[in-house]
Amino acid sequence: MNHITLHSTNIPKSLLSQQIEINFNSSILNLLQTKRLFTLLDSPILISSKNSLPTLTVLPLIFLIRLKHEAKQHGLYLHDIRLSGGAASFILDPTGDLAFRDLDFLISVNDVTSESTWSNIKKAVFTSLPLSNKENQCLSTEIYTDKMIRIINEHDRWGLISLRNVDGRNLELKFVEHMKRQYQFSVDSFQILLDPLLNYIYLTKKIDLYPSIIVLSSYGNISEAFQHLHYRLIAVKAPEELRGGGLLKYCDLIARGFRPANQIQMKDLQRYMCSRFFIDFRDSLTQEQVLFKYVTSHFGIDYDVRYRFLRCLYDVISTDSVWLSAFERICFLRTISIMISSIMPLKVVNNVKPLLKSTCAYSSKKSTLNQSSRKYSPTCTISNQECLTPSVPTSNTLIKSPSEKSTNLILLSPTPMTSLSFEQIDIFVQIVNSLRTELFPKLNNFLSSM
């Protein structure tokens, strides 16, 4: 457990007894969940720069306490700070084994539309970072951020500052004046109010006792949302309101072992997801970029989950994309099929360690895509020289050791090769899995008995 050192400022003790009405849509963390929350907030995150500036070690707990103080110094009032998204679901998950990536914080403010207020918010954020040279604070606005955006329209007024982590575990700070939709599915609708914990530790400097911490659900019924999380069920309301329809997140949940709470209803909702996805991302290039960004930022080297995600997406688009024309559907299915074929060498190498250094390459060509003028032969070659596992969370991992290093992948230009159909790829995967689960154990038993 990390030692806490804080600078003293005057914060009213009334903040310790912040009153929030407990109803059917709220609950209180138990002791195990509270300890898990504290451990998460007390675990360091490395914030990386885009150039030669040093990497910062940030404790989220201390950072948030400093942020409240710095905001006050810049004339801002933060109404409350909430942990949301996958990290909040991880805290509440009975198994404690739910994977997530970013730490998402919702911070309620009065205004994000005016340039002066937004400028003060950025100053408060970067003066809260543990920078050794305070003159670099203005420069840090761009160097230590992965993205910085503001959304201002009739439905939403909020801004995002994402502090960059090289492994993809970004520290996401969302300053919200108003947000129409704060969640996608019931299992990621939870919000944990952190102010009682932050104020208690700030004022008492003690970590042996914990205050009561309230959790809310934007889904509408917290008991139902808890049940969905416990039994790994998927439920969504009005997916047409979500940018992208929640289609990629839905397939992600399916790939990680979740299943629809209502199979018949979800079949209809899939059509809404597909329709909204292709309304928001109309052209093939944008669709490909969105899909590639989601895959690279959510799965790390977990190629099994990545493969299942793409297979699920392929099936959903094939059956439920009624809004698309035949040509548009074919183009996107071709993109997914190519991505699956490029994953296969990585998936095999990740699961079965080769005895010799080798090169694996596959080409994908869907049999229904009879367009002779365009032929695709993507090739992916893997160099097995010192292949080490990068510290990226998998479906069953929260945080890996910082000593782990990155895998060395080399992508070569396409070369003429024998094409594998989508069905052949599937058969290949089944054969490999069969060898791993049946033949290899029997062979080991036979050799050990000799």
Image (cartoon, rainbow, N blue to C red):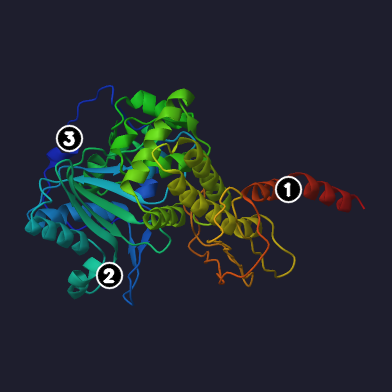
As drawn, the label of residue 18 is 3
Which callout, 2 or 3, points to the residue nearer the camera?
2
Work out how far the residue at label 2 is from the one at label 3, CA to CA, in angstroms.
36 Å
Q: Is residue 217 left or right of residue 114?
A: right
Work out how far the residue at label 1 is from the one at label 3, CA to CA, in angstroms.
59 Å
Q: Is residue 411 left or right of residue 37?
A: right
Local crowd size for mark 2, using a 10 Å CA cut-off: few (<14), some (14–19), many (≥20): some
Please give the name of the residue rendered at 25% of the width and 49% of the height, measured from the top-left corner.
205
Which amino acid type is shown beneath numbered disc 1? Answer: Ile
| Residue 117: quarter of image | bottom left
Q: Is residue 183 left or right of residue 293?
A: left
Which amino acid type is shown beneath numbered disc 3? Answer: Gln
Which amino acid type is shown beneath numbered disc 2? Answer: Ile
> Label 1's element?
helix
Judging by the rendered image, the residue that carries numbered circle 1 is: 431
> Label 3's element?
loop
Please give the name of the residue rendered at 30% of the width and 55% of the height, measured from the top-left corner.
4
Which callout, 1 or 3, points to the residue nearer the camera?
1
Q: Earlier in the sequence, mark 1 or mark 3?
A: 3
Local crowd size for mark 1, using a 10 Å CA cut-off: few (<14), some (14–19), many (≥20): few
- The foreground one among 233 and 152 is 152
Q: Would you place residue 381 above or below residue 42 in this image?
A: below
Judging by the rendered image, the residue that carries numbered circle 2 is: 143
Which callout, 1 or 2, points to the residue nearer the camera?
1
| Tally of marks | 3
Residues at marks 1 and 2 touching, judged by CB atoms closer than 8 Å: no
Q: Earlier in the sequence, mark 2 or mark 3?
A: 3
Q: Residue furthest top?
A: 24
Work out how far the residue at label 1 is from the one at label 2, CA to CA, in angstroms.
47 Å
Q: Would you place residue 246 above or below residue 238 in this image?
A: below
